[in-house]
Image (tube, rainbow, N blue to C red):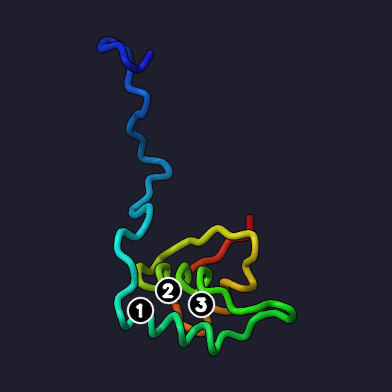
Amino acid sequence: MPQVRSSAPAMRPTAAGQTVRIMCATGPDLTGRQRIGSALATAELPPKKRPDAVDALVALTAARHGSAVVLTSDPDDLTAHLKALDAQDVHVVQV
Protein backbone atom coordinates (compact mmCIF):
# COMPACT_ATOMS: atom_id res chain seq x y z
CA MET A 1 0.00 0.00 0.00
CA PRO A 2 1.38 3.44 -0.91
CA GLN A 3 0.29 4.88 2.46
CA VAL A 4 2.71 2.70 4.44
CA ARG A 5 6.02 4.44 5.15
CA SER A 6 8.14 1.48 4.12
CA SER A 7 6.36 0.94 0.79
CA ALA A 8 7.48 2.39 -2.50
CA PRO A 9 5.77 5.65 -3.49
CA ALA A 10 2.77 5.40 -5.80
CA MET A 11 4.40 7.77 -8.28
CA ARG A 12 7.98 6.96 -9.17
CA PRO A 13 10.33 9.32 -11.01
CA THR A 14 11.14 8.38 -14.58
CA ALA A 15 12.91 10.11 -17.46
CA ALA A 16 10.52 8.78 -20.09
CA GLY A 17 7.48 10.79 -21.06
CA GLN A 18 8.03 13.75 -18.77
CA THR A 19 5.96 16.80 -19.64
CA VAL A 20 7.21 20.35 -19.42
CA ARG A 21 3.77 21.90 -18.90
CA ILE A 22 0.48 20.23 -18.16
CA MET A 23 -1.80 23.22 -18.61
CA CYS A 24 -1.78 26.96 -18.74
CA ALA A 25 -2.57 28.48 -15.37
CA THR A 26 -3.57 31.91 -16.64
CA GLY A 27 -6.45 32.91 -18.86
CA PRO A 28 -6.06 35.13 -21.91
CA ASP A 29 -5.49 38.85 -21.41
CA LEU A 30 -7.14 41.54 -23.55
CA THR A 31 -4.73 40.95 -26.44
CA GLY A 32 -5.33 37.21 -26.22
CA ARG A 33 -9.09 37.69 -26.28
CA GLN A 34 -8.73 39.91 -29.34
CA ARG A 35 -6.64 37.22 -31.04
CA ILE A 36 -9.33 34.63 -30.24
CA GLY A 37 -11.96 36.89 -31.81
CA SER A 38 -9.79 37.37 -34.87
CA ALA A 39 -9.23 33.62 -35.19
CA LEU A 40 -12.98 33.00 -34.91
CA ALA A 41 -13.62 35.54 -37.66
CA THR A 42 -10.89 34.43 -40.09
CA ALA A 43 -10.52 30.66 -39.58
CA GLU A 44 -11.27 28.68 -42.74
CA LEU A 45 -13.35 25.97 -41.14
CA PRO A 46 -14.49 22.79 -42.91
CA PRO A 47 -17.99 22.88 -44.45
CA LYS A 48 -20.91 22.61 -42.00
CA LYS A 49 -18.70 23.69 -39.10
CA ARG A 50 -19.31 26.78 -37.00
CA PRO A 51 -16.69 28.87 -35.18
CA ASP A 52 -15.97 27.47 -31.73
CA ALA A 53 -14.52 29.70 -29.00
CA VAL A 54 -13.13 26.72 -27.09
CA ASP A 55 -11.15 25.52 -30.12
CA ALA A 56 -9.83 29.07 -30.60
CA LEU A 57 -8.83 29.27 -26.92
CA VAL A 58 -7.03 25.91 -27.11
CA ALA A 59 -5.25 27.05 -30.28
CA LEU A 60 -4.18 30.33 -28.65
CA THR A 61 -2.92 28.54 -25.54
CA ALA A 62 -0.89 26.10 -27.65
CA ALA A 63 0.48 28.93 -29.82
CA ARG A 64 1.51 30.94 -26.75
CA HIS A 65 3.50 28.08 -25.28
CA GLY A 66 5.06 26.78 -28.49
CA SER A 67 6.34 23.25 -29.07
CA ALA A 68 2.85 22.11 -28.11
CA VAL A 69 1.15 18.85 -28.96
CA VAL A 70 -2.64 19.04 -28.92
CA LEU A 71 -4.67 15.83 -28.82
CA THR A 72 -8.12 16.20 -30.35
CA SER A 73 -10.88 14.18 -31.96
CA ASP A 74 -11.49 16.95 -34.51
CA PRO A 75 -8.14 18.12 -35.90
CA ASP A 76 -9.59 20.08 -38.84
CA ASP A 77 -11.24 22.71 -36.63
CA LEU A 78 -8.19 23.16 -34.45
CA THR A 79 -5.83 23.30 -37.42
CA ALA A 80 -7.97 26.02 -39.01
CA HIS A 81 -7.77 28.12 -35.84
CA LEU A 82 -4.01 27.55 -35.58
CA LYS A 83 -3.54 28.75 -39.16
CA ALA A 84 -5.65 31.84 -38.41
CA LEU A 85 -3.37 32.56 -35.43
CA ASP A 86 -0.23 31.87 -37.50
CA ALA A 87 0.99 29.33 -34.93
CA GLN A 88 4.39 27.95 -35.92
CA ASP A 89 5.38 25.10 -33.63
CA VAL A 90 2.13 23.38 -32.68
CA HIS A 91 1.39 19.77 -33.57
CA VAL A 92 -2.15 18.43 -33.75
CA VAL A 93 -2.73 14.70 -33.20
CA GLN A 94 -6.05 13.02 -33.84
CA VAL A 95 -7.23 10.63 -31.13
Secondary structure under the numbered disc 2 in the rendered image: helix
Q: Position of residue 19 (x, y in %)?
A: 37, 49
Q: Which residue is mark 3?
A: 82
Secondary structure under the numbered disc 3 in the rendered image: helix
Residue at far right of view: 48
Residue at far left of view: 5
Based on the displayed image, in which of its 4 quarters is residue 1 positioned? top left
Mark 1 or mark 2, earlier in chain: 1
Q: Which residue is mark 2?
A: 60
Residue 26 as seen in the image, left or right of residue 85: left
Q: Which residue is mark 1?
A: 32
Residue 82 as seen in the image, left or right of residue 46: left
Residue 16 as seen in the image, left or right of residue 75: left
Q: Position of residue 89 (x, y in %)?
A: 44, 72
Which amino acid is tagged 1? Gly
Q: Position of residue 83 (x, y in %)?
A: 53, 82
Q: Which of 89 and 3 lies nearest the eye of the viewer?
A: 3
Task: Check residue 69 in the rendering and tell me which mark sits there, or answer none.
Answer: none
Q: Is residue 9 above or below residue 34?
A: above
Is the C-beta separation of discs 1 and 2 under 8 Å?
yes
The residue depicted at 38 percent of the width and 79 percent of the height is 33
Question: Callout 2 environment at 10 Å: few (<14), some (14 to 19), or many (20+)?
Answer: many
The residue depicted at 47 percent of the width and 71 percent of the height is 59
